[in-house]
Image (tube, helix red, strand yellow):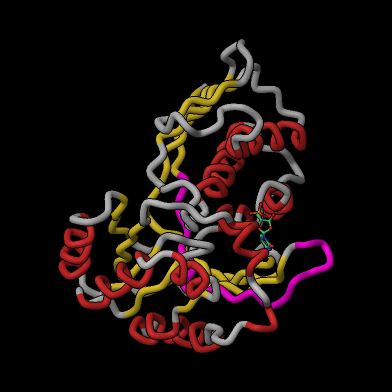
Amino acid sequence: MDITVRAHAKLNLTLDVVRRREDGYHDMKMVMQSVSLDDRIRITTGTGERDRVRSNLTFLPTDERNLALRAARLYCEASGADPGGLLIQMQKQIPVCAGMGGGSADAAAVMLAMHSLYPRDGLGLEELCALGETLGSDVPFCIRGGTALAEGRGERLTPLRPLPDCRFVICKPPFSVSTPALFGKLRCQKIRHRPDTEGVLAAIERGDLADIARHMYNVFEPLVAAEHREVREIQQSLISAGALGACMSGTGPTVFGLFDDTAAAEAAAKELKASYSAVFVASPL
Ligand code: C5P
């Protein structure tokens, strides 16, 4: 059997770190948005061989370190499904280690695909999210998608009203940031500037795009921008090109701008492409 699914990237409209927990993780408060930028994943079952992963990115692990393969195996363990050998073929577009939840999106899409191939009583979305959480903090959001407030490690989700039609211009500068290292650097008590999450929630409820954009903020942004001038440069470029707001996503280094005008978004992307190779225009989902 063969199934092809799309794994959608996420952006953080806001990201706040509330406190460090006893278990080493942090309690978060984030407004998350899934977007049209995606990876395509084709799953073939019954190959009669050992499970395999293929990808257009040669540096991605194809063994147990691959989140998509781990997600498939986890679903099989939980459901008792026996696919008789899996081939997972990944066409990745979402930049890797970029703050856009690419690995989590792939894991979520694979779990949903396995669920549609091998449905089981008592194994619904809620259970998939609980399984997904063991793979990564953003997996439950990627399973649900849309617009949501994420709290706890990221697994406590409150669905929000969909955003008004708009465009995101997304730019990943050519370096990566280690998520655990960045969390390690952050001193929660010393965070001087935090996002106005309530303000964003109210703006989303009103469907007020300009106000959503004005309130977008990520507490990791100054830490990454202090070491990499590209973060501020991309923000400036997006704002000069007409973005209503521009912000870093996740632990970075991806920066995105929010536009209410498609032509302005396309023009902003064209300008950034002169300096950066990973530039995308996407819509909210
Ligand atoms: O859950 P995930 O594997 O995505 O997390 C990667 C790392 O990010 C964790 O090992 C931890 O250092 C940090 N993290 C955190 N608090 C969260 C999510 C992630 O400290 N809520």
> Horizontal placement of 43 versus 137: left or right?
left
Q: For the C terminus, give its image quadrant.
A: bottom left
In the rendered structure, the answer to whether residue 188 lies left or right of residue 57 reads: right
Q: Position of residue 282 (x, y in %)?
A: 32, 59
Tell which quarter ligand 1 is in. bottom right
Tell me: 52 left or right of 151.
left
Q: Which residue is more in the foreground, 267 or 124?
A: 267
Q: Is 76 rendered above or below residue 230?
A: above
Q: Residue furthest top?
A: 48
Q: Percent position (x, y) of residue 252?
A: 48, 61
Magenta stretch: give its range.
7-24
Toward which corner of the image does residue 204 lie, by quadrant? bottom left
Specify the quadrant of the image occupied by residue 70: top right
Relative image position of residue 106 (x, y in whole percent) = 53, 43
Residue drawn 71% across and 68% down? 26
- At horizontal 46% and vertical 63% (from top left) the residue drawn is 11
Q: Main secondary structure of the magenta part?
A: strand
Is 203 above or below relative to 251?
Answer: below
Q: In the rendered image, is residue 165 in sight?
A: no
Task: Name the residue rendered at 44%, 29% in the picture.
Answer: 58
Can residue 282 be seen here? The reply is: yes
Q: Nearer the viewer, residue 70 or 238?
A: 238
Examine the structure image and report whether residue 138 is included in the region drawn in magenta: no
> Which residue appears at 46% of the width and 54% of the height?
98
- Residue 73's quadrant in the figure? top right
Q: Is residue 21 magenta?
A: yes
Q: Farthest right residue?
A: 22
